[in-house]
Image (cartoon, helix red, strand yellow):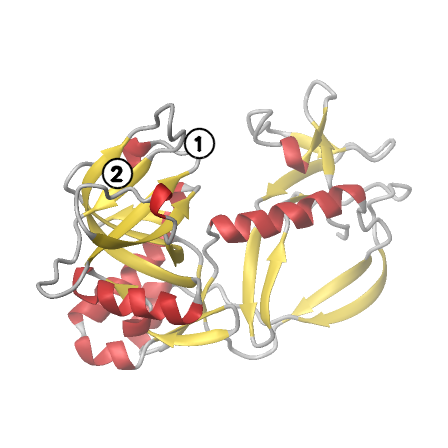
Amino acid sequence: MSGAKISYALDNNGNQISILNYYNFGSPSPIYCGGKGCGVLLNHVSEFKREGRNGTQYIPAHYRLAKGIDHVEHCIFKTSGNHSLGVDLSDQDVVSALRRGDDLFRIHIIDTDDQQKIHIKEDDFVNNPNINAIKKDYRAKGKKSTYVKTIQSLKEIYDFGLQNPLAQNKIQLMLNGEKRFWNDFFFSVAQYEELKQKIRGEGIVKAAVVGKVHVVRLASNSNPFEHIEFHPQKRRFSSDNYPIVKLTKSMNSNLFNFVSRVLFYGGFTIEANPNKLMITHAIGDEFRTIVSSESQVIEI
């Protein structure tokens, strides 16, 4: 069984479904190879990213052969040759890894910035599909740290650190080729000032923030996006710190229940434009991120 990544497929009605339109067509299933005279069963693979020693790789969505299936011999998507590619495999469960005492985890959760980069690669993939790919024999190349692929897994690491304070200075999370300790990645209300200063020093900081929903601001004529305002960190002799989530138009604010505590992941910046500030009833600093997927948010 061998085959290249495929940029389009056919549904039951013979419609050609590009990877760019898969969800617009309602995630059709089953789907088939569009190679002339082929028509074998395919699967859709969502976009994802890989963290490694050399940084982040963004993998666009694509179609691939269903398990146990192969293209017909003359199909343009059937690969040839036999090239061996060393790949570090890691599908370990996060909870099991924590119980074993593992202390390095690779963040593979896709946030809004990652989605934009992946969409660029998807456009390039659709316009320049790699038809002449060679067959790859994947082989494990030693043990590698555990993938954190979901916000639920990220919550498990957060909970473990709370229950085991000594682990906060041992557990490291890798993203964008950088390793950061637990207590330099997770920020609850008591650490908002620390996160704000980190943002001021670095510009954009990817982090997981814990907050309690305070205000849900619906879209309006003056602001077409919904925003979530969280309870601030109150400070007696300095500005209060307000975490803000901006929702893309594809997101629904119902995901954020009033007064619930949530953990949300993304790239955080400080809003410096006074005309764009959401907090107008008090003096404070806003640090915010954009949420474009439910995979970035979980109630705790």
| Image location of residue 130, percent across then percent down | 81, 51
Alpha carbon separation for disc pair 2 and 1: 15 Å
Is label 2 or label 1 in front?
1
Indicate left or right for 265 with 119 as reference: left
Q: As drawn, which residue projects farthest toward the front?
A: 274
- Please tell me which residue lies in front, 121 or 25: 121
Residue displayed at 66% across by 44% down: 62
Q: Residue furthest left?
A: 236
Q: Identify the secondary structure beneath mark 2.
A: loop
Q: Residue 171: in sight, yes or no?
A: yes
Q: Amino acid at mark 2?
A: Phe
Left or right of 270, for residue 144 = right
> Is disc 1 placed on a helix, strand or loop?
loop
Mark carried by residue 256 = 2
Residue 64 in sight: no
Q: Residue beneath label 1, please? A: 249
Is residue 8 positioned above or below 122 on the image?
above
Residue under the image location 53 percent in, 53 percent down:
114
Name the residue at 63% across, 40% down: 43
Most foreground residue, 36 or 273: 273
Which sits in the foreground, 15 or 182?
Answer: 182
Residue 20 numbered tag: none
Q: Quadrant of residue 216?
A: top left
In the rendered image, residue 289, in percent from the top left (x then y), is placed at 38, 50
Residue 142 x, y percent position in the rendering:
56, 79
Residue farthest right in this picture = 74
Amino acid type of the residue tagged 1 in the rendering: Lys
Q: Residue 269: x percent and y percent? A: 39, 57
Labels 2 and 1: the sequence-earlier one: 1
Q: Circle 1: is it few (<14), some (14-19), or many (20+) Cα within 10 Å?
A: few
Quadrant position of residue 101: bottom left
In the displayed structure, does residue 29 sit left or right of residue 255? Answer: right
